[in-house]
Amino acid sequence: MEELLYKNVNKSSPMLGSSEKVTGTYKYVDDICAPEIYYGGVLRAGIPHGIIKKIDISGAVKSPGVKAIITAKDVPGLNAFGYFVPEQPVLCYDRVRYDGDAVVAVVADTQEHLVRALEMIDLEIEPLPIVDSIDEALDSKAPKIHEKGNIPYFVDYENGNFNSASADRLVDGFYETSMVKPMYIELESTIATYLNNRLEIITTTQSPAHDIQQLSRSLNIDEKNIHIKFMDPGGAFGGKEEIHTQILASLLSMKGKVPVKMTFTREESNMATTRRQAFRFYIKSTLSSDNHILGIYVRAIADAGAYISHGTSVLDVSGSHASGPYFIPNVKFEGMLVYTNHPPAGGMRGYGASEVNFALERHIDHICKELNLDPAEFRYENMLRAGQPNGTGLVPLSTVKARETLEQARSGRLWKSRNKASGLPPYIKIGYGIASGAKSTSYGQGGDSAKVKMTVEDGYINIYFSTPDMGTGIRPSIKLIASKSLNADIDFIRVYNDDTDFPLSGTANASRVTFMIGNAVVKCSISLLQTLRRSLGTAVDLSKKDTLEEINKRLGKVEVTEEYKLPAVAGGSYKKGDFIFSFATAVARVEVNSLTGEHKVTDIEFYPEAGNIINPVAFRSQMEGGIIMSLGYAIMEELKTFKGHVISNNFTTYMVPTVKDVPRITIGTIPGFEQLGPLGAKGAGELPLVAVAPAIVNALADATGKNLTRIPVRNEDLI
């Protein structure tokens, strides 16, 4: 049975070619079919808050084709998941806290039988009052979603002394971001097979090692007996960092003694999986007479939803990015999470930095409007320079080229043309906006590491690690790094990164993958060359296939493993601060119909600085994709709820940009070389998210004169 199921996926394959995805021949998890696979599904609460009064599965047990049914009592270990705070029930037994809470899971021989069995379950839930907003969560009379109350987490720090900063002027403002769902095409899916106390999983994930830890905890299985094969996902953007189908599919396989595939529907995905937090920011800044920012106070409140998930970490990252790309000597940050009856909020591309930077960049434009200052010049004069500490008090270890991104932006075509006549009807208003941002690479003072194995075998150089490729092109980049480090022909290098049997190299997030794994590959390359020299007594030329084959004839398989650890940095006023940053500036042009509020983003110029660009094609693809995602974030995307129920549950009711919405995009790169990075590279994948959305909103405000403080911007906001 197991051999049949895994015959097409039990061997790792080297670098996936782009043609397989373009032609549709690549198999995602849900594409894997075999006669022995059964189908798993979930009965969810369907109401946002309530007490479970009855769970009657007797009718479903007798339903045709049902192999097993599980409830909370069938969870052998901890009936909770959540990597940072394990508090979300695998299956609820007493209370539900949001629409998507899982209550019963079923496995059947066909999808039709599965649906029928789920319909036969008699579930009674007594509704409780709903907390449907941050305001309601903060109300002292609000119902408690958890016994500990509706405010589960605080974070605060102060670098310098905000209140003692002698200032000539003070400007304050209030800003909001909405709930946003990463609307990836591939839905969450897992195939689980439990046999002889060993669990084999095929899944779509960003965090395979985290998955194993949580599976072990809930299933009461030793981590050594859990093996995950992860496929390249069809999109993730942070939404597949948290557990989705993995635990339930595994439990069903354990009880039913059959391989189980569980795949969510689009509506289920939108209702039951994580999304970006909605944030509220209150910002107060003090300025000197010569227009330098002396201090800034940021108060942030984030909607965690029904369970914390990644909420604590996202809020922490917001705190570390509170000063953005600017030198502000006095920074005070206060943040809190609140529980609501919304879906849990996890990580999403930008991961706290994009939210706080939207508020900061709108605040910067607010300052410039109040004081009649040029927004580009004001930013330039206040930008962080090499050797200066950021808002947490840490001096970045990486290169600091924030000013260079702004110099290019204000010299570009868009910013220079902002005062020219448009030739459009008078009711069409033109606006230009500029915004800058900083995004950290890796986990900062939280620590980070990546391990890589390299072998010479079968006449090839093989590289192994266990971080998924999210479509960012990590495998081609790793081949390029190895080729350069070894002086080897790239055609003789193979990359394998789809299996938890490979060395632990961390998650696919935090703009860390190229930097961390690339550095581990550089270390591995040095170690391999040293090993070969010691064994052969001479240096070797790895650019020839004959040499690789000769090495194997003389030495057999040659193997080295190395780990790269992020430098440890002490100090600062915030123990979760970051110290490796990439920078960017964006310029946007918009057209607004002042009669109807209809608006269009016509042009985006984007100037990212991420050290040396190793793979220009992959880099440009990342930037373009991030720009389009930021467009959606700024003017259309919102996971809407009504009385706690998610009503934006598919592509009909949740709006995302299409090709008709894509503006003219110009990407200019800033020459650089990061001494800490592999071949001089830093992280880049999240850069567009911190700068593009505020640039668009700044342009809309410029066109209309409106004080826009919330995203997404709606037509009615512009009239």
Image (spheres, rainbow, N blue to C red):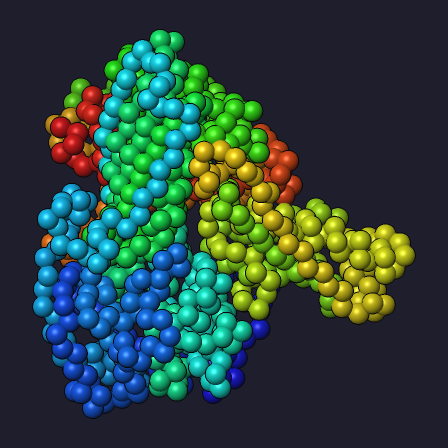
Residue 619: x and y in percent read 51, 42
Q: In which quarter of the image is residue 397?
A: top right
Image location of residue 400, percent across then percent down: 54, 28
Q: Where is residue 367 in the image (x, y as percent from the top left)?
A: 29, 19
Left of 611 or right of it: where is 278? left
Residue at 46% across, 67% down: 212
Q: Where 306 falls versus 25 (above or below)?
A: above
Image-based side of 165 in relation to 504, left or right:
left
Question: Would residue 13 be seen by someone viewing this image from the given angle?
Answer: yes
Res 246 quadrant in image: bottom left
Q: Residue furthest right?
A: 537
Camera-side residue of 74 and 198: 74
Depicted 133 relative to depicted 391: above or below: below
301 sits to left or right of 471: left
In front here: 195 or 116?
195
**Residue 497's x, y, as percent?**
56, 61
Residue at point 16% right, 32% down?
Answer: 717
Could you say which quadrant of the image residue 466 lies in?
Answer: bottom right
Please say if 252 is above or below 525: below
The C terminus lies in quadrant: top left
Count of numbered marks? 0
Q: Is residue 417 visible?
A: no
Residue at (35, 49) in percent of width and height: 312
Identify the residue shown where x is 31% and y is 11%: 168
Q: Residue furthest top?
A: 289
Q: In this view, does 360 lie to the left or right of 119?
A: right
